[in-house]
């Protein structure tokens, strides 16, 4: 499926109506459409607006008293005392009571927890898993789709069968198994490392299947020409198949990115030390600390979703296409 | 490496004919070499743990235990699945033998614990629930009531969320499939929650669900003109699970919307044109063309959402931990509590085996339904 098909639409309106009646009907339809669509926009964005707006309100009392109304979604400065012309001239207690909008909550997060470390952990784990996953899975899909060899059919059937096993079904044995695996440079046990968060998720049956489906659809002429010119089979994979497979590579990358960035169950099982803790578990930890400060917690939440939201808005076509493919290809 | 023109042609056209064996061996070797890393990963981190789950479920293995695990047969499954329905005898006055009643005239029964303690047959069992049938009261006792509550909640979640979320998603898909300015914007916004990590979504909604003074409470008050008072959403056993359902739908519906949208755009334009020639109105077109054409997409959406309902974990774990009084317990929350906190890897594996069998059953039903469709065609 291509990007164009997503934007295609069914013919709208009734062509048999003409003139004024037709225009009136069309206008009413548009008003109805935009009203419904806008109400739905409010439904889908209000928690996000609430999160960001509360995160930049530096006064905790303001946040908690604003929640019961529209003000929860409006960033406005809050003053406990009559405003003074210049804050620098004001007495210390006035300065302390004056609160406005700012990044204080974000600084507090960094003060209370090694947020940078968690962010780095999540970025490192996610990018490594996605990159290695693309390489390993496309390398496996290529011979399945484009070479002729013994065992091909059986292996493909096994990989398709493996798709059915959900991660949840193997989480407990995998927890046990990873305590017994050796680390590079000596030592046994993968708990509280990066290994345990990256290596088990590189190979992925569903990714292989998606890539396989795309690879068999690439015209054969391309690689045959290259082989006649003396290219090896591996070079065909690297120089012809991969560059021609950008849509499916993007799909696979997006799916895995969303899964690993948001993964919670697995790090909860195997990561106890803060050094290797990803953002999701750190977020839950932070949320569980008392006193529970709304501003700080929501600042933490904002910083956790910001990278994803930016990536999503920049590459939204790929994200949506990636998910749409999941449904069609199965 | 040089390949002659002849060999190149050979590869191109000679699929059925036997090829030079040297070439064949080379290709096979390269194939296995390229598959090796993925195969190794899938074997070590998927296939082996998958079979380990069955094996572990027959033992009393513990995480981080110095003692070697013992084989205990089906004991884990016995504890997990044991269920007894016991008819309860009313309390009788010891002197007159009459049935005792409270002030409202309800018959008084002994406490569940008293019954379960009185008979060795019920050793290790706890009360799951009680119900009345034909004027008699029954006590349901289970070896692991938490497991049954979790399973019941998974089914409850699936029964409510699957139809709601799927129809909502279809509605959104139809909406963003119209030819209006700005549909791309609407599509982007409706899809946006899907990319947010569930932990963050849960925590933001935790604040929105604030008991007493809270955004959701204020909103309900406004639209009911003050008739609906503040609720203690996540602390109320009756409301906590519906509250979790709402945020799950909010986060997940964009996913199904996009799948339905792709399905809608896969419907050939000619079908609608033909229907229009035949004089069909919009309603007839959606009933006789759109819905039948979306059959496979709908099956996929329903099955995928059902499987997600059984995997339900993060939002529950973050918001309620399965409480209050196990009202939001789910199978996966139970697995994590047994596995991670009780360290009972053997028992937790038995639960995951049951979980897998349910997911497998759902997938088999899906395949059967889709195959049937193909046969009709």
Image (cartoon, coloured by chain):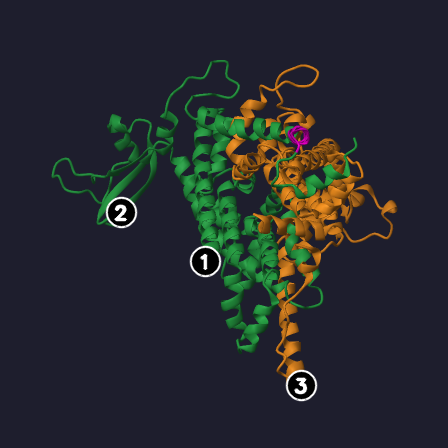
Chain colours: A orange, B green
Name the residue located 63 percent from the left edge and 64 percent from the top edge. Answer: B177
Residue B196 lies, with reference to residue B146, above or below; the image says below
**Does residue B87 appear anywhere in the picture?**
yes
Label 3 close to label 1 by CB (< 8 Å): no
Q: Which residue is mark 2?
A: B132
Element marked by disc 2: strand
Label 1 close to label 2 by CB (< 8 Å): no
Instruction: Tell me the mark number nearer the camera, choosing from 1 and 2.
Output: 1
Q: Is residue A314 left or right of residue A284?
A: right
In this picture, which residue range is highlighted in magenta? B20-34
Pick whichever, B127 or B374, lies toward us.
B374
Name the residue located 69 percent from the left edge and 47 percent from the top edge. Answer: A218
Mark 3 crowd level (few <14, some 14–19, many ≥20, 10 Å Cα): few
Please tell me which of labels 1 and 2 falls first in the chain: 2
Residue at the outermost left position: B96
Element marked by disc 1: helix
Pick whichever, A138 or B190, lies toward us.
A138
Q: Which mark is residue A29?
A: none
Q: Which mark is residue B376?
A: 1
Q: Is residue A201 left or right of residue B317?
A: right
Distance CA(mark 2)–CA(mark 3): 66 Å
Q: Which residue is mark 3?
A: A20
Q: Quadrant of the N terminus of chain A?
A: bottom right
Is residue B22 within the magenta segment?
yes
Circle 3 chain: A
């Amino acid at each position: 499926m291509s990007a164009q098909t997503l934007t295609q639409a069914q013919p709208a309106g009734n062509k048999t109506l003409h003139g004024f009646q037709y225009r009136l009907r069309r206008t009413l339809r548009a008003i109805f459409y935009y009203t419904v669509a806008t109400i739905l926009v409010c439904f889908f964005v209000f928690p996000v607006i609430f999160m960001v707006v509360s995160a930049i309100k530096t006064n905790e009392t303001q946040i908690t008293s604003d929640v019961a109304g529209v003000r929860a979604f409006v960033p406005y400065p809050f003053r406990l005392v009559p405003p003074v012309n210049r804050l620098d001239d004001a007495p210390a207690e006035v300065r302390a009571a004056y609160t406005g909008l700012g990044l204080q909550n974000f600084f507090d997060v960094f003060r209370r927890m090694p947020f940078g470390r968690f962010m780095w952990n999540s970025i490192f784990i996610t990018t490594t898993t996605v990159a290695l996953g693309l390489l390993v899975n496309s390398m496996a899909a290529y011979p399945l789709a484009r070479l002729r060899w013994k065992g091909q059919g059986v292996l493909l059937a096994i990989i398709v069968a493996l798709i059915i096993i959900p991660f949840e079904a193997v989480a407990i044995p995998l927890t046990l198994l990873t305590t017994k695996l050796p680390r590079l440079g000596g030592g046994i046990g993968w708990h509280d490392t990066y290994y345990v968060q990256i290596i088990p998720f590189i190979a992925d049956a569903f990714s292989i299947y998606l890539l396989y489906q795309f690879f068999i659809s690439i015209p054969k002429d391309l690689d045959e020409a290259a082989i006649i010119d003396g290219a090896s089979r591996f070079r065909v994979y690297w120089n012809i198949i991969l560059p021609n497979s950008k849509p499916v590579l993007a799909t696979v990358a997006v799916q895995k990115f969303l899964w690993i960035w948001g993964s919670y169950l697995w790090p909860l099982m195997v990561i106890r030390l803060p050094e290797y803790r990803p953002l999701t578990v750190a977020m839950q930890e932070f949320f569980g600390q008392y006193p529970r400060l709304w501003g700080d917690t929501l600042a933490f939440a904002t910083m956790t979703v910001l990278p994803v939201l930016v990536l999503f808005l920049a590459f939204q076509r790929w994200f949506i296409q990636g998910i749409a493919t999941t449904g069609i290809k199965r | 490496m040089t390949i002659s023109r002849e060999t190149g042609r050979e590869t191109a056209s000679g699929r059925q004919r036997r090829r030079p064996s040297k070439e064949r061996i080379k290709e096979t070797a390269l194939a296995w070499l390229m598959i090796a890393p993925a195969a190794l990963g899938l074997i070590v981190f998927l296939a082996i743990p998958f079979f380990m789950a069955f094996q572990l479920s027959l033992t009393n293995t513990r995480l981080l235990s110095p003692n070697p695990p013992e084989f205990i047969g089906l004991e884990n499954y016995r504890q997990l699945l044991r269920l007894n329905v016991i008819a309860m005898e009313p309390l009788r006055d010891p002197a007159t033998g009459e049935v005792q009643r409270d002030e409202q005239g309800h018959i008084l029964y002994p406490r569940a614990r008293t019954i379960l303690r009185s008979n060795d047959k019920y050793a290790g069992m706890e009360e799951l629930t009680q119900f009345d049938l034909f004027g008699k009261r029954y006590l349901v006792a289970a070896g692991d009531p938490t497991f049954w509550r979790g399973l019941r909640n998974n089914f409850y979640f699936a029964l409510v969320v699957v139809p709601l979320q799927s129809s909502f998603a279809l509605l959104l898909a139809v909406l963003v499939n119209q030819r209006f300015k700005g549909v791309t914007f609407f599509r982007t916004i409706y899809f946006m929650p899907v990319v947010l990590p569930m932990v963050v979504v849960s925590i933001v909604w935790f604040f929105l669900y604030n008991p007493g003074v809270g955004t959701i409470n204020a909103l309900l008050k406004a639209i009911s003109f003050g008739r609906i008072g503040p609720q203690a959403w996540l602390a109320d056993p009756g409301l906590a699970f519906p509250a979790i359902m709402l945020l799950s739908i909010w986060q997940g519906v964009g996913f199904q919307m996009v799948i339905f949208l792709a399905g809608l755009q896969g419907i050939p334009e000619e079908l609608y044109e033909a229907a229009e020639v035949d004089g069909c109105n919009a309603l007839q077109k959606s009933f006789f063309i759109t819905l039948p054409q979306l059959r496979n997409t709908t099956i996929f959406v329903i099955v995928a959402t059902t499987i997600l309902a059984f995997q339900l974990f993060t939002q529950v774990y973050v918001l309620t931990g399965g409480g209050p009084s196990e009202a939001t317990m789910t199978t996966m929350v139970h697995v994590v509590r047994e596995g991670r906190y009780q360290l009972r890897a053997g028992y937790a594996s038995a639960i995951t085996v049951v979980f897998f069998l349910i997911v497998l059953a759902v997938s088999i039903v899906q395949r059967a339904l889709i195959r049937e469709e193909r046969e009709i065609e």
